Image: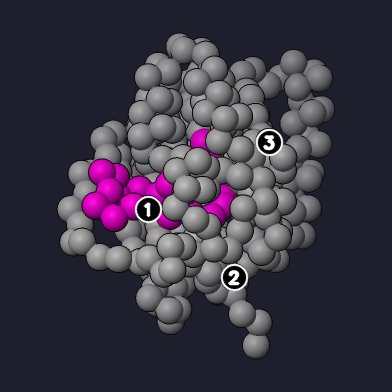
Amino acid sequence: MNIKTLLKLGLLMTLIISQTGLLQAQGKAKIILTGGTNITDIGPGCEVSINLMKDAFDYVGMMTGIEMDYTFCTGNNFNKNYILQTVAEVEEDLYDVIVLFNSSHGFNYLNSTSRHTFFVAHPTAAGSISQEEFQTYGVSLELEIFKTLKKKGAPTVLVFSESCNVPINIEVPAMYKTMNPNIGNRLKELFLSEPAHIISSSSEYGQYSYTDNKEGGIYVNSLLHAMNDVTTKCDKASWDKVMALTQQNVEEYAKNLDGGQTAIYDINDATPITLEETSAEEDGYIQSGIRIRKKK
């Protein structure tokens, strides 16, 4: 029996148990899933990544009793104004866990004030993007998302973006699948007993970020695999372990790719950036995006 079948059976059992009143809510989580699912070059990969995260948090809810409150900023709703409005309107002191996951094209600035990605929040923007469009559609993962959500009063705030941290167009190896069953206690440790404010980008400043239109991105699969390993193989689950293993997984699976890929993360506060001045400009344009694996 494969993991997808187990998940479907698990979700069915959750519905049955909830109808009989046996499952009591253990907390409440706000899950915001954003991504460029309509973008011509990487849209299918973004959709796979978002669906993987949705399946994962459905499973977390099933195993822990956490009530999941989803908002999707995808398709035509993947635009800067809608995303920022969604983040701003998250109710204060209502949630135990707040999560935002993004999958899209991304970039960063020369001499940036943040080492984390700026993602391009536009339903169809792809390929070469002008400086003006970067200013119009760019969203700072740290300055506009993470800092806003940290003020909402949730003990655990998780902000993840699978997007490039410089101009790119990349390939990806086969990725991991979503989490295994029988990990309810460890998931409760992670989501209810281990509060943390986390911000993470799929690649460090100046690096590509790889995805696959069938399997999703290296980063999201590495993250889910790390969550699975920590909650099934460790004596105690913690976000330190999850993020360290995510970083290790990403580096391992990207070691033979152009420039490699190293996920970055900060727990509680973002690390200030120190950069050398370089230039990625070409004829007034900077390419931006997630590279897609070239099929052999």
Q: Residue at x 64, y 61 (%)?
A: 42
Q: Is residue 228 positioned above or below 86 on the image?
A: below
Mark 3 Cα shell of 10 Å, populated few (<14), some (14-19), many (≥20):
some
Mark 1 Cα shell of 10 Å, populated few (<14), some (14-19), many (≥20):
many
Residue toward you, 38 or 98? 38
Q: From the image, tell me which residue sits under label 2.
A: 292
Badge nearest the viewer, 2 or 3: 3
Q: From the image, tell me which residue sits under label 1.
A: 108
Q: Amino acid at mark 1?
A: Asn
- Cα gap from disc 1 to disc 3, whole angstroms: 23 Å
Task: Answer with mark 1 or mark 2, whichever residue precedes in sequence.
Answer: 1
Q: Quadrant of the C terminus?
A: bottom right
Q: From the image, tell me which residue sits under label 3.
A: 77
Q: Find residue 281 and report its image quarter.
A: bottom left
> CB atoms at circles 1 and 2 under 8 Å apart?
no
Q: Amino acid at mark 3?
A: Asn
Q: Find residue 256 and report its image quarter.
A: bottom left
Instruction: Name the chief secondary structure element in magenta.
Output: loop
Please state the horizontal and vertical placement of residue 284, each as a whole percent of the image: 43, 62
Please state the horizontal and vertical placement of residue 189, each as a whole percent of the image: 43, 33
Q: Is residue 276 visible?
A: yes
Q: Amino acid at mark 2?
A: Ile
- Cα gap from disc 2 to disc 3, whole angstroms: 23 Å
